[in-house]
Amino acid sequence: MMEHEKENTDNMMWYLDMGARNHMCGHKHLVKELQKVETGHVSFGDASKVEVKGQGMVYYLQKDGLVESIQDVYYVPDLKSNILSIGQLMVKGYMVLMKDRVLHLKDKHGRLVAQVEMGRNHMYKLNLISVREKCLQVNIKDKALIWHLRFGHLHYGGLNELAKKNTVQGLPDMDYEGKFCE
């Protein structure tokens, strides 16, 4: 069972950037399913370069309570601010409309994802609520029931057959007879 826990941090402020080629995050704990990148760096307007250490996903909580993800996010440890690439969002099918100092971000179905007012510095800052996965352990003493659940509520006769024929590696040979799913 998976539960998501809100992360209360100011690390989830994202700048929406027209000039950025990729989404980037400087906070390793926010980037999930992190894959190492062979070589790579990000160049900035002042000619400075910082190294890309990986690529992954960032999970955030939507206003409706559902968890959504930002994919293909570079982990750049030296980065002080998180950056959402408007170009990368558009490639993924998002629509961007900027009018009257407000940026409207819509998904590929035309649903409003975010509405962000322009800041005093002429930047669009989006505050997301980060979530991190939390695994919950279930303690069940009935081993037959555990295997029944692991196999998607397979009937106990089927489990008995698999165990006797040694079809599934690791499935213990135990008595599955006389049990039923409620």
Image (cartoon, rainbow, N blue to C red):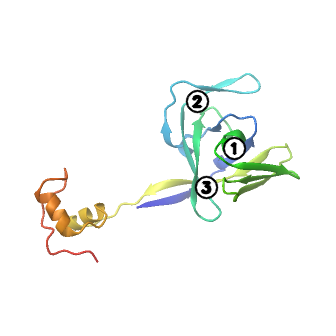
Task: Residue under label 2, please give it.
Answer: 52
Q: Nearer the viewer, residue 87 or 79?
A: 87
Q: Nearer the viewer, residue 66 or 131?
A: 66
Residue at 54% over, 31% down: 53
Secondary structure, mark 3, is loop
View extreme (bottom): residue: 182
Residue at 19% over, 65% down: 158
Report how far apart the C-alphas of labels 1 and 3 lie in the structure: 29 Å
| Contact, mark 1 vs mark 3 (Cβ under 8 Å) | no
Secondary structure, mark 1, is helix
Task: Residue under label 3, please give it.
Answer: 8
Decide which of tag 2 and tag 3 comes sooner along the chain: 3
Task: Residue under label 1, please give it.
Answer: 90
Residue type at mark 3: give it.
Answer: Asn
View extreme (top): residue: 47
Report how far apart the C-alphas of labels 1 and 2 lie in the structure: 22 Å
Say few, some or many: other residues with alpha carbon within 10 Å of mark 3 (under 14 / 14 to 19 / 20 or more): few
Residue type at mark 2: give it.
Answer: Val
